[in-house]
Structures are given as C-alpha cells and as structure tokens.
C-alpha cells in the first residue's frame, strides 16, 4: 500500500478515479448518493427490506470514498434528503409541506456532516471501521440536538426483522447501527479490492482480508449474540390487555372529539369485562390504555372521572389511563395515570421528553410566520422528571410514552429501575394512515430485544401490538379499528449487556470516529507541511 499522503482537500492517490469532469458523468455520484438515501428509506418498515441498508451503505461508500470534504458534505446532504424526505413525510400529513420539508432539511445536515467525515477517513487503512463510527457519531449528535434531539430514522430502527437484530442486546441501537454500516462499507471495499486485483494481477491480501472481515464480523457477531434472545419467563408471566378505542376521524381534529375518544376506550374496556365474565377471553392482570385516551382532565372533570372509574371497576384490575392534565396555572402535562378499581387514581407518570413543535412550540412567534398551525398548540406541555415504573398487580411496568421510545435513555431508565415489562402507550391519530405507526412499532421491537423485555404498545388508532422479548409480535391490531389485545407474556428481570452498559458502547464508537477523524487530520497536516517544504 502506498504511503503517499494526500492533502485533506484533494483526492489522494487512493481515491476512486473520476469518470469525467463534464457532461452527464458529473451527476453519477450525486445520483448514487440520492439512491443510497432512498434505499435506506426502503429498508424501513412497513417493507420487509431491512437488507437493503447494507448495499445502501456500500453505494454511499462508493460515492464518498476519496472525495474532497466539500464534496463529501454535499453528497452526504443529498443522501440525507433521499433518506429523510420520504421517511418523514408523515410529519406533514395534516400541517402542510413546509414543516415536513424543513424538518427533513435540518436533519439531513447531520447526514451531510457524516458524509464529510466519511470522505475524510476514507483514505485511511481499514476505512470502513472509521466510516461506520462517523455514521454513529452523526446519529448520536442528531439524537441530542437541537431541542433535545430527533433520533427518528436511526439505522437500527429499520432492522427489527434483520439478521443483525441480536446485536441490540449487546450494545443497543449504536452497536446495531454500526454493524449495518460497517457491513455495507466493507461490502464496497471487498468489491473495490477484487477489482484492483483483477486489474493489476497482484493480490492485495492484507486489504482484501480486512475488507472481508468488515463484512463477516457484524454477521458473525449477530450469530454469536443469538443466545441473548431469551423470552423465557424468569419472573413468571402476566396476562395483559391493550385497548385500542379508535378515534372518530383522522387528523388534528381528533382533539375536537375528546369525549368520543374517552368513551370509545371505556366501551372497549367494558366489552372486555363482559367477555371475561362469559369466559370468551381470559381475565387480564392489568389493562393498558393509550396516550391521550382521555384528553379530558379526569381530576378537573367529574364526568370524565366517572366514565373512567366505571370502566375500571367493571374490569376489576389496575388500568393505566393516558390523560392530559390541565392545572389552573403552569404547563399542561401528558400523564399516565394508574387507576385502581377500588382506590381510583393512585400513581402518575408525566412524559419526560415532550415533543417540540407538537407538544410545545419553541420560538413560537418565528415559527408562526411559516405555519399558523402552531396556534393549535395554544398551551405548551411541560416535561416530567420522575422515571415511570408502575406496580400493577405485582408486575413492575416501565412506561415510555410514544415519542420517548425513540430515545435510548428513556426506555433504559425504566428497566434499570426494575421494570419487568415495558409499555409504550402512543397516539398517532394525527398522522392518519401514514407509515409513522409502523416505524414506531419497529422501535418497540428493537427495544424488546435491547432490554430482553416484553413490550406492549397500546395505540389510540393503530397499530397496537404485544411483543415478546425476542422481538416477535404475537398480537397486532389493524389501523383505525377498535380492538382489545389480550395475551400472556413472560416477565423478566435479568439485564442484557446493552442495558448494563448504557451509553458506554455509543461513547466507544464515537471515540472510534473521533480517532479516525483525528488521524485523517494529522495526515493532512503532515502532507501540507511536506508540500510546503
């Protein structure tokens, strides 16, 4: 391998040759970057095309390897738009195109930064490792800033049906995403080395072996991690019921039918109680309602309190209600209420990560210039601070409300505080029949494997589901269809390596990325000094 070092802003001798500087050839790499992004989108649910993520990273590696930093940023941005624009189209389902395009454009900047970093490290030995680390660095940043981050679209969340899924139990979403990116970049490097071998007749044993290892290591690691997929009932089992009451109509206006939504969930619970009495359905140990199943504050509205209390008394077991609590002063609270059939409300959990531009409006006067829908959120929600773990009939249930399922810490906290089962109550009626609900369901499947816990997803309008600790969906509802899912699920208390280590795997992968970027910068600095001399 040549030891010549290229300047940071110029293609080095290891760079892939340009097909041409003018004409249609100039569009080849930009087109490849966009196509790579679209392939990443297509790898996400509801399509069972998880494997597309691997060639997507391979194609992205071809587009970025050896490029100048400015070109890497631009190509990365095109890949980001190709990925995020179709992935996040549901964000504009009812509020118009501008919020969707603006969100996608801002989030694509992180992928652009990843493109710049990948271009920089692509001249290093074993570059697929450094490049995959840079991708995870960008995801880590995107999950934290701005406004608390937006991790929707983490590569790991597209792998709920994939062979790499067991790695979620090893190191969480960062390790799972790193494995997919490494395999893809390694695949391209294998092809590149084989082509070089055929062209020169000289077998590049070391580089070819390293490239093959980048492909085989993630797959081998996933196979080795399969024993961590354990759905045995360490702490016995619990019969859980998830109620999907449905909403009167799609879109933002479902909020205008708050009483109808509450009545729907109460009615489904009453029907379940009648089915239990007839012996046609098993008696649940507890019942879970979705987020916003009562947008009427039951503490301030005696009528809503009475509707909930009658339904809970009828079923006769602890029930978790999703309610909007409106104190006389201060911010609203998105609250889950543990409702006991004898004592009424006995515990609450306030959502800790409220959604910017959905549950509260940052920079409201500025945002109003572009979209008047911000005034639909007339009163901001405030964030809670306590970790949510309810003791429901002897079962410790961890709570992560809707949007929180996308954040590693919000789910892990409940497990480290004793949760034997996780509940992700959600409300996606706002987003109609879009792919949003399937994307969110995939997150919960990854969380089930990551923490080796059964996960119950009660949703107002679908898709509700009950997931075993190995990520398998055992019960699932249809969209915008009233339903009650009842299933006996295993309870577990052991901790996976991912749960035990927390953010450590992500920190190590970020360190890998920073080391690669530092090495690349040092090589460029030395090369410039050499040219100057």
Image: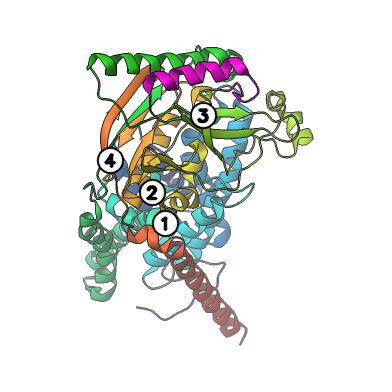
Closer to the camera, 388 or 119?
388
- The label nearer to you, 2 versus 4, is 4
Q: Position of residue 406 (x, y in %)?
A: 47, 44
Q: Helix or strand or loop: what does disc 2 sit on?
A: helix
- The label nearer to you, 3 versus 1, is 3
According to the picture, the residue beneath numbered tag 3 turns out to be 322
Residue 390, quarter of picture? top left
Q: Position of residue 377 (x, y in %)?
A: 68, 27
Q: Residue at x 58, y 44 (%)?
A: 352
Q: Label 1 vs label 4: CA separation?
A: 22 Å
Q: Helix or strand or loop: what does disc 4 sit on?
A: loop
According to the picture, the residue beneath numbered tag 4 turns out to be 468
According to the picture, the residue beneath numbered tag 1 turns out to be 174
Q: Residue 156 carries which label?
A: 2
- The label nearer to you, 3 versus 2, is 3
Do tag 2 and tag 1 residues touch (Cβ < 8 Å)? yes
User: Reading the chain from its start, which is encountered first: label 3 or label 2?
Assistant: 2
Do tag 1 and tag 4 residues touch (Cβ < 8 Å)? no
């Amino acid at each position: 391998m040549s030891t010549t070092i290229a300047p940071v802003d110029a293609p080095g001798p290891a760079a892939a040759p340009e097909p041409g500087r003018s004409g249609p050839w100039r569009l080849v790499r930009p087109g490849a970057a966009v196509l790579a992004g679209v392939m990443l989108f297509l790898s996400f649910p509801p399509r069972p095309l998880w494997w597309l993520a691997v060639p997507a990273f391979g194609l992205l590696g071809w587009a970025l390897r050896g490029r100048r930093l400015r070109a890497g940023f631009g190509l990365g941005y095109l890949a980001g738009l190709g990925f995020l624009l179709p992935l996040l189209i549901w964000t504009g389902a009812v509020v118009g195109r501008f919020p969707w395009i603006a969100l996608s454009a801002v989030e694509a900047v992180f992928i652009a930064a990843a493109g710049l970093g990948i271009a920089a490290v692509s001249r290093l030995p074993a570059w697929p490792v450094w490049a995959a680390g840079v991708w995870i660095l960008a995801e880590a940043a995107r999950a934290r800033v701005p406004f608390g981050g937006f991790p929707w679209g983490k590569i790991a969340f597209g792998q709920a049906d994939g062979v790499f899924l067991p790695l979620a139990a090893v190191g969480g979403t960062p390790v799972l995403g790193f494995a997919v990116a490494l395999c893809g970049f390694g695949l391209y490097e294998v092809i590149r080395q084989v082509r070089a071998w055929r062209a020169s007749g000289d077998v590049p044993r070391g580089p070819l072996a390293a490239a093959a290892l980048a492909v085989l290591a993630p797959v081998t690691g996933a196979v080795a991690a399969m024993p961590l997929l354990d759905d045995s009932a360490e702490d016995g089992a619990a019969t859980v019921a998830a109620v999907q009451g449905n909403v009167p109509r799609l879109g933002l206006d479902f909020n205008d039918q708050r009483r109808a939504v509450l009545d729907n969930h109460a009615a489904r619970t009453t029907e379940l109680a009648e089915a239990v009495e007839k012996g046609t359905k098993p008696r649940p140990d507890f019942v879970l309602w979705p987020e916003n199943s009562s947008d009427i504050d039951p503490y301030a509205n005696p009528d809503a309190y009475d509707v909930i209390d009658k339904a809970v008394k009828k079923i006769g077991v602890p029930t978790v209600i999703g309610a909007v609590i409106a104190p006389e002063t201060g911010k609203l609270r998105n609250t889950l209420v543990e409702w006991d059939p004898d004592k009424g409300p006995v515990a609450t959990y306030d959502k800790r990560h409220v959604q910017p531009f959905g549950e509260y409006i940052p920079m409201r006067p500025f945002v109003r210039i572009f979209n008047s829908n911000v005034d639909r959120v007339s009163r901001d929600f405030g964030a809670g601070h306590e970790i949510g773990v309810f003791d429901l009939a002897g079962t410790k249930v961890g709570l992560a409300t809707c949007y929180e399922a996308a954040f590693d810490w919000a789910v892990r906290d409940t497990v480290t505080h004793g949760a034997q089962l996780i509940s992700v109550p959600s409300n996606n009626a706002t987003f109609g029949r879009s792919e949003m609900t399937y994307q969110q369901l995939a997150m919960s499947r990854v969380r089930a494997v990551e923490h080796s816990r059964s996960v119950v997803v009660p949703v107002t309008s679908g898709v509700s589901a009950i997931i075993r600790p190995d990520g398998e969906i055992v019960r699932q509802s249809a969209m915008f269809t009233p339903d009650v899912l009842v299933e006996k699920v295993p309870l577990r208390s052991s901790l996976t390596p991912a749960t035990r280590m927390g953010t450590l795997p992500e920190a190590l992968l970020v360190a890998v990325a920073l080391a690669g970027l530092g090495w690349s910068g040092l090589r460029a600095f030395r090369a410039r000094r050499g040219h100057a001399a």
